[in-house]
Image (cartoon, rainbow, N blue to C red):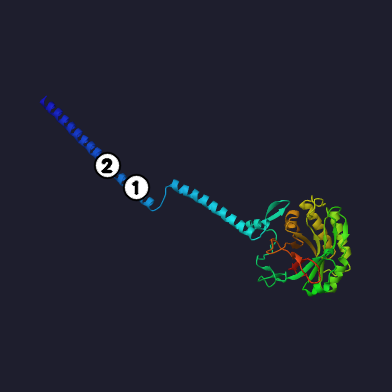
Amino acid sequence: MAQDRRKSFGTRHMHNAVSIIFLSLVSILALSFCVYLLLINAKLEKEEEAVKLELEAITKEGYYTKAEANQMVEDAKIKASVEATNSLKDKIQSKLEAGEGTTSTIRSLFPEQMVVASGGRYYFLPISDNIEHHGFADTDFEIDDNGYLQYLGNDESVKIANGIDVSRFQGKIDWKKVAESGIDFAFIRVGLRGTSEGKLLVDDMFETNIKGAIENGIKVGVYIYSQALNEEEAKEEARLVLDNIEPYNITYPVVIDIESADSETARTNELTSDEYEIVAKTFCDMVKSAGYEPMIYGNVKSFTLLMDAEDVDEYGIWIAYYGTPLYYPYHFNVWQYSSTGKINGIDGHVDLNICITDY
């Protein structure tokens, strides 16, 4: 019995010792965890303090918060917009004060487009890369003191010939004096179609002019002022031209003049571009079949609004644009650069041209 009591006491003593050890270990672990938390907290406090110091340093260096930076970007955009607007206004003002017209000023602001004024409005047309561009720089041509256009570019292959185009409006011409003035070629008007009634007429001075030019060594081409409405009328105009030039040595192109008439009663006012193109192509194809070089005359409006330059690209191009630089990006053969030329042998004004194609 005494032995059992001693055994029981020993067992309880052992259990107590184990409990004390276990509780001690738990206490040590809890203490260690608390110490760990204290260390982590101290580290975080140091990092927070470091971040605060860094932010203070950044602020002192001129950096900004995200919100402040976004506001600064918006302010910069507004400022840039105002500056760009003022710069544009200054540019427009300076051009207008220098005497440039409204259309010329607007064109200078849109270099990637063709700007055409017609009917009290402006048309903005993309410049096509599907047609060959002439490649001349703005500074390649200049009008000299005599009123003639001269080529100043570096391309030695470019050879220009000086020419005029005439009709009965020039009256009686002294072609000998014209030749002595350095004129190499002349386009002689064969005839015209009336803008309202559509009657075909031969120019009163055609025969006199073409004989006088050829007799004085001036190379000649011819043209007709068209107001044809359709394929049949275009054929009529071609036949009138071909019949009248048959006796003469025509070395320059045979041309159809495609322009919109400045008249509310003009018969072509309602023509579409497709209809204009049919007229031009019909005329040119007949001329080519007869053995002559076909060409289309027109201004910037002619080759943008009346016709699409791409659709008549296969024919020779005679572009009318007065002054320099030429406001037409595509290839051309003849450039009518003035309507107020002065030539010995002609009373009053005459159209001046250069040709860059050797015919």
Q: Earlier in the sequence, mark 2 or mark 1?
A: 2
Q: Residue furthest front?
A: 97
Distance from label 2 to label 1 (Cα)? Answer: 21 Å
Residue occupied by mark 1: 52
Horizontal arrangement in the rendering, residue 244 relative to residue 65 (left or right): right
Q: Residues within 10 Å of mark 1 (few under 14, many from 20)?
A: few
Residue 228: x %, y % from top left = 83, 55
354 lies above or below 88: below
Q: Is residue 44 visible?
A: yes
In terms of depth relative to the viewer, which is nearer, 338 or 357? 338
Closer to the eye: label 2 or 1: 1
Quadrant of res 343: bottom right
The circle drawn on residue 287 is: none
Residue 110: x %, y % from top left = 64, 56
Q: Residue furthest bottom?
A: 180
Amino acid type, residue under disc 1 in the picture: Lys
* Quarter occupied by the N terminus: top left
Q: Residues within 10 Å of mark 2 (few under 14, many from 20)?
A: few
> What residue lies at 21% left-to-right and 34% top-to-bottom?
23
Residue 356: x %, y % from top left = 73, 68
Residue occupied by mark 2: 38
